Amino acid sequence: MYAIHPPWFYRVLSPKYLLCQVPVRNKVAYLTFDDGPVPEATPMVLDILVNFKIKASFFCVGDNVRKHRDIFDRIMADGHAVGNHSFNHLSGWKASPGAYYNNVMACREYFDSKLFRPPHGRFTPGQYFVLRNDFRFVLWSVLTMDYHPAVSPEQCLLNATENLSPGAIIVFHDSIKSKEKMIYALPGFIEYALARGYTFEVLSPEV
């Protein structure tokens, strides 16, 4: 089994500091992408978004931005939002609060954003408290599971469409591992949402 939604105890934290779903009633959704930028996947995502004329939010790994600055610059030039995803995709369960803080701040050396998504959604209370005044944590309401080896491309699409709701934050991954499933599911999900009257907006610290 796998979890589409974040654990309940994350959802009871103050939305001022941690966001799982944007509190709106109208049909607005928030597409997000984790783990890029990488040349094998991110440009394909950007081309799809241009084709549909929609914007998204990219949670970028600092070391990938360092290695692929041209792709990051295209993300910005295309009008998308960006968020911090640590410097090298560090799991919060494997680091002290101090080491975790330093890793997140190392990402900040390559671009500045007040949005932060913990890799794997994993963080400890200590890490949360040392970072929450610098960042707004952003998790998700819908995890497509495009990276999971047991999830087919078709199931990935169903995970997204069957859990769409106003204010939903949907996670895809612009990574090598997820590319094939993501590229299959993303256009179908966008078409599904648009056909049902949804629009897409970017995340900001103020939503």
Image (tube, rainbow, N blue to C red):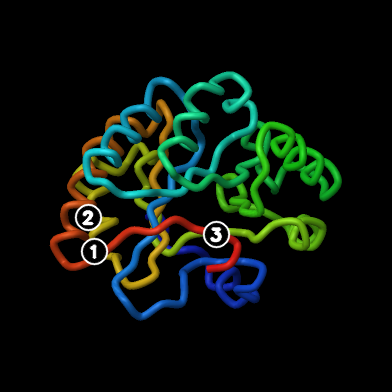
Name the secondary structure under disc 2.
Answer: helix
Residue 125 in sight here:
no
Q: Which residue is found at the position 79% from the left and 63% from the top?
A: 129
Q: Nearer the N terminus, badge 3 or badge 1?
A: 1
Name the secondary structure under disc 3.
Answer: loop
Q: Please tell me the numbered disc located at residue 158.
A: 2
Return the x and y of residue 24 as percentages of the image width and height.
Answer: 41, 77
Return the x and y of residue 184 as percentages of the image width and height.
Answer: 21, 38
Return the x and y of residue 29 as percentages of the image width and height.
Answer: 35, 63
Q: Which residue is found at the position 65% from the left and 76% from the top?
A: 14
Whether label 1 touches label 2, CB < 8 Å: yes
Q: Which residue is found at the position 48% from the left and 42% from the top?
A: 34
Return the x and y of residue 38 as percentages of the image width and height.
Answer: 46, 25
Say which of 109 and 125 sits in front.
109
Outermost residue to the left: 195
Crowd class of label 2 (few under 14; some 14 to 19; many from 20; radius 10 Å): some
Taking 101 as reference, is 140 left or right? left
C-alpha separation, residue under disc 2 versus residue under disc 3: 27 Å
Mark 2 residue type: Leu
Residue marked by disc 3? 204
Taking 48 as reference, is 7 left or right? right
Quarter of the image for residue 200 reads bottom left
